[in-house]
Amino acid sequence: MEIPPESAEATTEYEGESFHFCSNDCQALFDSAPEKYVETPHPHLVEASGAILPRLPYGRAKGEFDIEIEDPTSLQEGDSVRFSKEITDDDVRKFAEATSDTNALHLNDEFAEKTRFGHRIVHGTLVSGLISAALACFPGLTIYISQNLEFRRPVDIGESLTAQCKIVDDLEGDRYRLTTRIENDADEIVLDGTATVLIDPLPE
């Protein structure tokens, strides 16, 4: 993804023009097929199963996704997406900095040992953020309208989680109702709920 020069970590030249990138990884993607990135409206977006997804190979962001969609041009009941990621200590500390949620339960071992959990756990909102990551795996531009959540169990730092979003109702005006669920690597449900989203076409 090209970014303003003052924010760039990497820069390259192509046909007499300078291109600026958020990381060396993004520059390497450009260098692998520069003509594609110059001639295509959204060359930086991810392609999967015949669909263009509004996901970026952004910096050091990690995680794996899988989509089960019958027709990418017409979403319907039963279509689903999954996103999996390990939640690291670095993730927890960066989330605390970004949100200013510096609850000692998430950041201080000695404090957390004296709580009902016996050790530090991941912020609940960081866990639920994996649902948003999964929603970005649907073709089109997914916009949150509402979300109901029930936290079933705490998440330990270092656990691998999988978020699944499945369309259960096709509403009017490109709106959909979905089930949203997150499981740990022991197949235990850590979060369960429903969401309503609006899915716009990708911009031209």
Image (spheres, grey):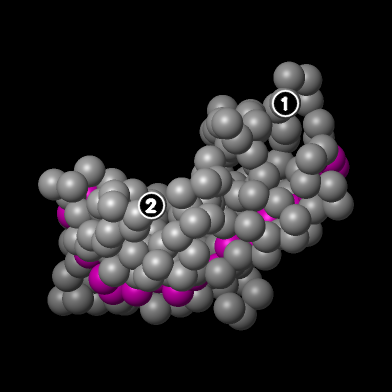
Most distant residue in the top direction: 173
Numbered label tally: 2
Residue situated in front as seen by the camera: 150 or 45:
45
Marking on residue 174: 1
Locate residue 24, reporting x and y percent. 29, 69
Instruction: Please say whether residue 92 is visible from this viewpoint.
Output: no
Residue type indicated by callout 1: Asp
**At 18% from the left edge and 47% from the top edge, which residue is drawn?**
5
Labels 1 and 2: the sequence-earlier one:
2
Instruction: Kindly state the secondary structure of the residue where label 1 is placed.
Output: loop
Cβ atoms under marks 1 and 2 closer than 8 Å: no
Q: In the drawing, does residue 148 fall left or right of residue 99?
A: right
**At 53% from the left edge and 41% from the top edge, which residue is drawn?**
41
Quote the CA–CA distance across marks 1 and 2. 28 Å
Q: Is residue 109 above or below residue 66?
A: below
Residues drawn in magenta? 75-99
Locate residue 183, reporting x and y percent. 60, 67
Quarter occupied by residue 12: bottom left
Marking on residue 1: 2
Instruction: Kindly state the secondary structure of the residue where label 2 is placed.
Output: loop
**At 49% from the left edge and 64% from the top edge, which residue is drawn?**
33
Give the mark toward the camera: 1 or 2: 2
Marking on residue 183: none
Residue type indicated by callout 2: Met
Q: Is residue 112 above or below residue 176?
A: below
